[in-house]
Image (spheres, grey):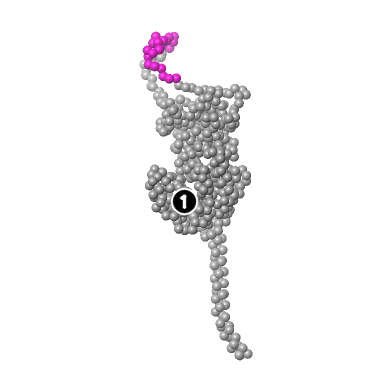
């Protein structure tokens, strides 16, 4: 028994340190697991209902998305400076596959928006288009950006400059891609919305060509180059996969009227239009005329707001956004006048000068910024700009210079003369008036175009 005790004691003594270490290790693991669990519960981020895995969200604020402003004044210097920025040596993991969750209508609009970004930003080049498409989807998943595909692509389109994707506000969309190129881009966009990933750009949310130098280039991680485009991600946690949602629930996509000429799914019934038209005209007669009445006053129509509608629905007054390419004002005319056999649009960029009703007074005309008029029956179509305001416009599109009428004060002698001749018959023509050429040549007649009601039964649109 003692022997047994003596024999057993050394055995227990040898096992005790091992068991003690095991108990301590188990306790430490349990505490670590509990801490991680509590950390996840308290600090993990749900983005649009999607769980975010990885390291916890830091206390630093989310990066601000500033309007994109590029300096393209010195391409050679920009290329040199861009080459001096080193590529990040940190890992560049590929983005997760994205699977669009919206219905058929939303998916069709999302495909158009993604395809537009791809083809207008990268041209008809599959590699470049996929790189741009990946940036759009990365932005869609990041909490700093809108939560629809169209919202991401056309963010800031209302600005004259500073939109996120430059093609949405610099007039590039006036050039329509070929049908083959457009369908090719839509096919690539459709694949990316169904899980295709362009791995080289990783989680990039920014890019630019190597011949421009944005102010933010040195503040982000440069991770990839695709042809002449350089791709960047935010530094720190906000550029890691943990900051991006696994999925984004999208139930609807906005209609982008700038895409209506390329796709029928973006033709909003309230503002249906075509950018270029057919047959050499700004408007497209294939569209039925919109019903625009007083209830639309104050609403935005492309680059401005409607302020007045003429009785009969053929005349319109607008206040346009000031700045940017003046050619974009044609967008408002193409929307409003689509399908109308007779239409005139008068527009001002100064809201204080914009008339609020018809008839428009002559005193308002000198400050008018833009006008469009069309009478289909006579073939008249004219788009004019105030060249004092837009000196770069071709002179053939300049409005006639109008000087504000100045009311001359009446003298006392004028009042007495009016009184003294009140009972006299109207004078006949002067002798000089019967001999043309003896006086100063007459001023050219001012063209006045009056719109009249269309004939009963007359068609309102024509098949091109």
- Estimate the x, y position of residue 275 in percent, counting from the top left: 53, 35
Q: Nearer the viewer, residue 194 or 338?
A: 194
- Residue 87 horizontal side relative to residue 51, left or right: left
Marker count (numbered): 1
Q: In this view, does 429 lie above or below 214?
A: above
Q: Which residue lies furthest to the bottom in this view?
A: 2
Q: Where is residue 245, by image quadrant?
A: bottom right
Residue at horizontal 43 percent and vertical 32 percent from the top: 393
Residue at horizontal 37 percent and vertical 18 percent from the top: 412
Query: What's the magenta region?
Result: 420-445
- Estimate the x, y position of residue 153 in percent, counting from the top left: 52, 45
Residue at horizontal 48 percent and vertical 29 percent from the top: 383
Query: Dot 1 lies on which element?
Result: strand
> Which quadrant: the N terminus?
bottom right
Q: Is residue 50 above or below residue 441?
A: below
For residue 443: magenta?
yes
For residue 181: magenta?
no
- Estimate the x, y position of residue 179 in percent, counting from the top left: 56, 39
Majority secondary structure of magenta residues: loop
Residue at horizontal 53 percent and vertical 51 percent from the top: 198
Q: Which of 37 and 377 is in front in this view?
A: 377
- Please say whether residue 457 is visible from this viewpoint: yes
- Estimate the x, y position of residue 74 in percent, counting from the top left: 38, 44
- Please say whether residue 298 is visible from this viewpoint: no
> Which quadrant: the C terminus?
top right
Few, some or many C-alpha atoms within 10 Å of disc 1 (few <14, some 14-19, many ≥20)? some
**Disc 1 marks which residue?**
225
Q: Is residue 85 above or below residue 74?
A: below
């Amino acid at each position: 028994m003692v022997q047994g005790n003596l024999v057993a004691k050394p055995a227990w003594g040898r096992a005790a340190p091992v068991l003690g270490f095991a108990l301590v290790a188990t306790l430490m693991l349990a505490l670590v697991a509990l801490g991680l669990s509590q950390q996840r519960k308290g600090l993990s981020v749900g983005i649009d209902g999607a769980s975010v895995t990885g390291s916890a969200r830091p206390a630093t604020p989310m990066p601000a998305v500033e309007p994109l402003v590029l300096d393209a004044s010195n391409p050679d210097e920009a290329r040199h400076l861009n080459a001096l920025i080193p590529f990040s040596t940190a890992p560049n993991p590929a983005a997760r596959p994205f699977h669009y969750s919206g219905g058929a209508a939303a998916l069709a609009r999302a495909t158009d928006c993604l395809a537009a970004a791809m083809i207008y930003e990268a041209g008809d080049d599959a590699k470049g288009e996929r790189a741009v498409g990946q940036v759009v989807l990365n932005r869609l998943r990041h909490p700093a950006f809108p939560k629809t595909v169209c919202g991401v692509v056309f963010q800031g389109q209302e600005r004259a400059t500073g939109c996120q994707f430059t093609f949405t506000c610099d007039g590039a969309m006036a050039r329509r891609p070929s049908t083959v190129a457009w369908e090719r881009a839509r096919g690539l966009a459709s694949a990316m919305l169904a899980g295709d990933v362009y791995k080289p750009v990783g989680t990039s949310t920014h890019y630019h060509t190597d011949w421009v130098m944005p102010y933010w280039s040195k503040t982000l991680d440069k991770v990839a180059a695709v042809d002449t485009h350089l791709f960047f991600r935010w530094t720190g946690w906000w550029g890691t996969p943990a900051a991006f949602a696994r999925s984004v629930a999208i139930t609807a996509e906005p209609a982008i009227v700038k895409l209506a000429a390329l796709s029928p799914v973006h033709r909003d019934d309230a503002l249906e239009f075509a950018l270029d038209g057919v047959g050499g005209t700004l408007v497209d007669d294939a569209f039925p005329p919109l019903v625009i009445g007083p209830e639309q006053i104050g609403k935005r129509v492309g680059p401005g707001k409607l302020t007045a509608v003429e009785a009969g629905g053929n005349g319109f007054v607008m206040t346009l956004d000031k700045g940017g390419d003046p050619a974009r004002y044609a967008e408002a005319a193409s929307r409003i006048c689509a399908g109308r056999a007779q239409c005139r649009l008068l527009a001002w960029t100064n809201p204080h000068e914009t008339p609020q009703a018809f008839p428009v007074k002559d005193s308002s005309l000198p400050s008018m910024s833009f006008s469009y008029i069309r009478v289909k029956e006579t073939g008249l179509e004219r788009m004019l700009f105030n060249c004092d305001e837009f000196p770069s416009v071709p002179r053939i599109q300049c409005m006639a210079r109008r000087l504000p009428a100045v009311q001359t004060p009446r003298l006392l002698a004028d009042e007495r003369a009016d009184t003294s001749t009140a009972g006299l018959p109207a004078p006949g023509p002067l002798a000089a008036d019967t001999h043309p050429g003896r006086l100063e040549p007459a001023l050219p007649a001012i063209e006045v175009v009056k719109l009249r009601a269309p004939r009963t039964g007359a068609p309102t649109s024509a098949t091109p």
